[in-house]
Image: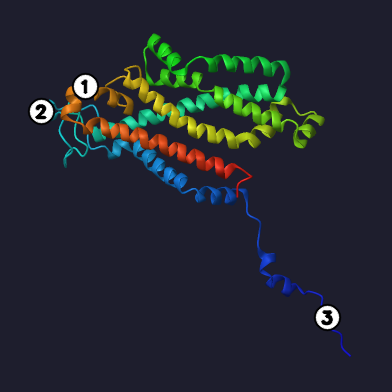
């Protein structure tokens, strides 16, 4: 009587679909989670188009943003001037494109500086702890206790406002939130096994901070940076509206709003402040949408 061979063969294993499936990589998991958030995807697409149009402003803009035409001032939207003209006859569409370059430059430049300062201070405080942590965090508390808008107005009023000085001022006043978040992450990560192992073999603290712990804390830092860009753009617009931001004739979305606050302009050309204001609103909202999407995608507890 023959015996049946129940041992699985190689062919049987290869035909099993479950054996063929490979685990998802971290990149695929991130993309899958991010795509689930429809608002985040929408915000990312709109932001890409806004940034691209700002970068390509010299190619897209139909006119020089500083070219005036007093005979054509406050013209309504038409075929020659798609968004109309301002009180000096300058093309609003061209100025919005070039103004986007300035507003986005201030936003990204300021956030880059704030991340460098905040990450460095937060990493040192969280890694060493004790007295070092106490001193640095009390310094952070002092900065946070000062109303940011009044501090910005004071600093900008003392020095002649310009793009580079605005970036520096925003970086100096915007790093505290990043520092606190990085500190919290470092306090948690410094007790993990891989950090203790690095200390045991004599790895220098600088290498442990920047090569081992910091890469594992990048998720919250990226989310904070995304949200901070929108905040800086909005604050720059507020300062420019008060006449303390980017100075004319250099266009920015904020000083275009400031230029349109004249009662005569509002009465004769209500479309003029609407377009830069709408761009500010859309850009800030999209940065917030993307920040929320990144937070969900980088959270390991969310599926």
Residue annotated with mark 3: 5
How many numbered discs?
Answer: 3
- x 70%, y 25%: residue: 127
**Secondary structure at numbered mark 2:** helix
Outermost residue toward the left in this view: 71
Query: Would you call the spot at circle 3 few (<14 residues within 10 Å), some (14-19), or many (20 or more)?
Result: few
Task: Decide which of tag 3 and tag 2 comes sooner along the chain.
Answer: 3
Image location of residue 257, percent across then percent down = 28, 26
- The residue beneath circle 2 is 71
Q: Residue 53 in the image: x percent, y percent?
A: 34, 39
Task: Locate residue 279, reporting x and y percent.
Answer: 33, 35
Which-is-in-front pick, marks 3 and 1?
1
Please determine whether, in this image, residue 158 is positioned above or below residue 18. above
x and y percentages locating residue 9 in the rendered image: 77, 75
First-in-chain label (2 vs 1):
2
Q: Which mark is residue 182?
A: none
Tell me if label 2 and label 1 are in contact, CB under 8 Å.
Answer: no
From mark 3 to mark 1, how far is it between C-alphas?
92 Å
- Tell me the colour scheme of the image: rainbow
SS assignment at label 1? loop
Q: Of residues 100 and 146, which is closer to you in this image? A: 146
Q: Residue at x 37, y 43 (%)?
A: 49
**View extreme (bottom): residue:** 1
Give the mark, 3 or 1, whose residue is nearer the N terminus: 3
| Residue annotated with mark 1 | 262
Evaluate whether residue 68 shows in this view: no
Q: Residue at x 65, y 62 (%)?
A: 21
For the N terminus, the image quarter is: bottom right
């Amino acid at each position: 009587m023959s015996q049946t061979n129940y041992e699985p063969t190689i062919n049987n294993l290869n035909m099993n679909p479950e054996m063929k499936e490979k685990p998802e990589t971290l990149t695929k998991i991130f993309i899958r989670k991010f795509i689930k958030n429809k608002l985040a995807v929408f915000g990312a697409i709109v932001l890409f188009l806004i940034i691209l149009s700002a970068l390509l402003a010299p190619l897209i803009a139909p006119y020089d943003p500083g070219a005036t035409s007093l005979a054509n001032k406050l013209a309504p939207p038409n075929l020659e001037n798609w968004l109309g003209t301002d009180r000096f006859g300058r093309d609003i569409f061209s100025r919005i494109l070039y103004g986007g370059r300035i507003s986005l430059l201030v936003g990204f430049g300021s956030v880059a500086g704030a991340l460098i300062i905040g990450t460095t201070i937060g990493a040192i405080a969280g890694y060493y702890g004790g007295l070092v942590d106490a001193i640095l965090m009390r310094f952070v508390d002092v900065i946070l206790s000062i109303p940011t808008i009044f501090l910005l107005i004071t600093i900008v009023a003392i020095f002649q406002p310009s793009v580079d000085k605005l970036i520096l001022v925003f970086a100096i006043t915007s790093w505290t939130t990043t520092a606190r978040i990085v500190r919290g992450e470092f306090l948690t990560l410094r007790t993990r096994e891989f950090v203790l192992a690095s200390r045991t073999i004599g790895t220098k603290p600088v290498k442990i901070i920047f090569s081992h712990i910091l890469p594992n804390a990048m998720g919250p830092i990226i989310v904070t940076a995304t949200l901070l860009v929108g905040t800086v753009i909005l604050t720059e617009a507020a300062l420019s509206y008060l006449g303390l931001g980017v100075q004319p004739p250099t266009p920015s979305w904020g000083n275009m709003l400031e230029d349109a606050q004249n009662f005569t302009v509002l009465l004769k050309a209500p479309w003029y402040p609407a377009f830069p204001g709408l761009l500010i609103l859309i850009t800030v909202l999209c940065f917030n949408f993307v920040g929320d999407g990144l937070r969900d995608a980088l959270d390991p507890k969310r599926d």
